[in-house]
Image (tube, rainbow, N blue to C red):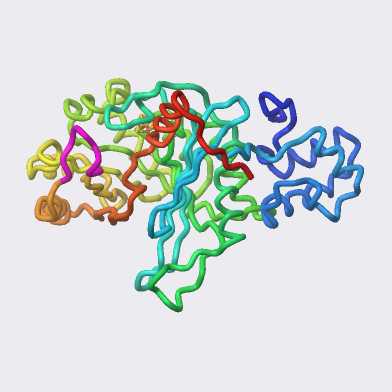
């Protein structure tokens, strides 16, 4: 079915695969070969205005402006960190719902080249209510369409295209002028919005358009076991990350209500099936909360839990955000000790590098909450493109 943007009743072209766009044109008596030209304008030239599509006949451009749109484009707020390595936007959707997206810029380090990663939202609000998450406290509004997911990536792609980013203090490092990675780790649970998320990934992956390699895409889930199994059948080489955060049901259920529906045995069985089908490593995200889940005892439990997955399990240790009111960040010694136990038990692991800037510390969902609170009391400057 052709996706229609909700209030404008126009077809959002960012939500269409190339064959769907060909079909859409055919239904209107237009030549299907125009679809490739339009795709090129949308995903390579990154235009967001039909009048700029200079190789299309004027009549088609007119028709497109009457019957189609290019995703949501209203940005209600944009923050850049002082070092400009993190940029956060609040995107307004056609029905007024607000979602956050973040661009993280990484200069080249050693062998690894520079990266520009977009953290994308998949839902307005979230139904899963994790206690450590600002989005989880908002409740669920709705799923995002594929076009609304794609639009977040294209916003930052246009920004980098217009002004490539160079790491300050790193002379000689090549400017980054395009998006290199996306992570579905923003607002919402991506596998709860399975169809639209998969559609968005396939659109961004299309070699006729944005051409972002599947290995540069990561889907992060709280652990919806049936959807993990379904994902293993998609024949997409994307990365799967599981928000684990605790190695026992008792502890995990305290912060992640979803664990009561899909307890650890069920989640790990789904991961095992996923690995057996895809032969791909799974990353387990583990937020380290001082004195809560970072003790030697929990490190041993975590190693035992993941041991059956062998080299296909990788743990990403994330020291909790220092701004969190209820939790303390563990010190470097505690982090090292925790990781060493995992290493000794043969579990590969890494620690998420601190970005050390002013807005990265603001957790997902906080910008929207702040905006909505201040909207009640004062007018906010609006930036739109
Ligand atoms: S952590 Fe993810 S799944 Fe949990 S409430 Fe927040 S957005 Fe939802």
* Count of numbered badges drawn on the protein: 0
Magenta residue span = 320-329
Determine the residue located farthest toward the bottom in the rendered image: 172
* The N terminus lies in quadrant: top right
Evaluate whether residue 164 shows in this view: yes
Q: What is the magenta segment's predominant secondary structure?
A: loop
How far across and how far down the image is residue 205, in percent? 59, 50
How far across and how far down the image is residue 137, in percent? 35, 24
Q: Residue 325 colored magenta?
A: yes
Q: Nearer the viewer, residue 312 or 131?
A: 131
Q: Residue 210 colored magenta?
A: no
Residue located 50% across and 34% down the image: 380
Residue located 43% across and 48% down the image: 239
347 relative position to 205: left or right:
left
* The C terminus lies in quadrant: top right
Query: Quadrant location of ligand 1?
Result: top left
347 relative position to 120: left or right:
left
């Amino acid at each position: 079915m052709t996706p229609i943007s909700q209030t404008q009743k126009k077809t959002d072209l960012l939500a269409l695969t190339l064959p769907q766009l060909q079909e859409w044109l055919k239904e209107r008596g237009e030549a299907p070969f125009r679809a490739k030209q339009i795709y090129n304008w949308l995903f390579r030239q990154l235009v967001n205005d039909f009048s700029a599509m200079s190789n299309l006949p004027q009549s088609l451009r007119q028709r497109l402006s009457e019957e189609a749109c290019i995703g949501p484009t209203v940005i209600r707020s944009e923050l850049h960190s002082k070092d400009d390595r993190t940029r956060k936007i609040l995107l307004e959707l056609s029905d007024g719902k607000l979602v956050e997206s973040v661009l993280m810029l990484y200069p080249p380090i050693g062998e690894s080249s520079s990266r520009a990663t977009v953290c994308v939202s998949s839902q307005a609000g979230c139904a899963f209510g994790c206690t450590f998450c600002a989005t989880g406290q908002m409740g669920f509004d709705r799923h995002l369409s594929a076009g609304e997911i794609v639009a977040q990536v294209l916003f930052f792609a246009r920004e980098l295209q217009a002004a490539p980013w160079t790491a300050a203090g790193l002379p000689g490092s090549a400017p980054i002028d395009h998006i290199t990675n996306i992570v579905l780790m923003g607002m919402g649970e991506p596998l709860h919005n399975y169809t639209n998320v998969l559609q968005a990934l396939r659109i961004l992956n299309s070699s006729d358009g944005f051409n972002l390699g599947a290995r540069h895409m990561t889907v992060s889930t709280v652990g919806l076991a049936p959807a993990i199994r379904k994902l293993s059948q998609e024949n997409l080489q994307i990365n799967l990350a599981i928000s684990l955060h605790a190695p026992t049901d008792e502890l995990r259920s305290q912060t992640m209500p979803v664990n009561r529906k899909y307890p650890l045995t069920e989640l790990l069985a789904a991961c095992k099936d996923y690995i057996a089908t895809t032969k791909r490593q799974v990353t387990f995200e583990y937020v380290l909360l001082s004195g809560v889940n970072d003790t030697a005892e929990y490190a041993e439990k975590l190693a035992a839990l993941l041991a059956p997955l062998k080299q296909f399990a990788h743990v990403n240790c994330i020291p909790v955000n220092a701004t969190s009111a209820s939790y303390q960040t563990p010190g470097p010694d505690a982090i090292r000790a925790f990781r060493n136990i995992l290493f000794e038990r043969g579990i590969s692991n890494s620690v998420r590098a601190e970005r050390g800037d002013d807005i990265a510390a603001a957790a997902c969902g906080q910008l929207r909450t702040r905006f909505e609170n201040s909207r009640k009391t004062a007018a906010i400057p609006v930036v739109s493109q």
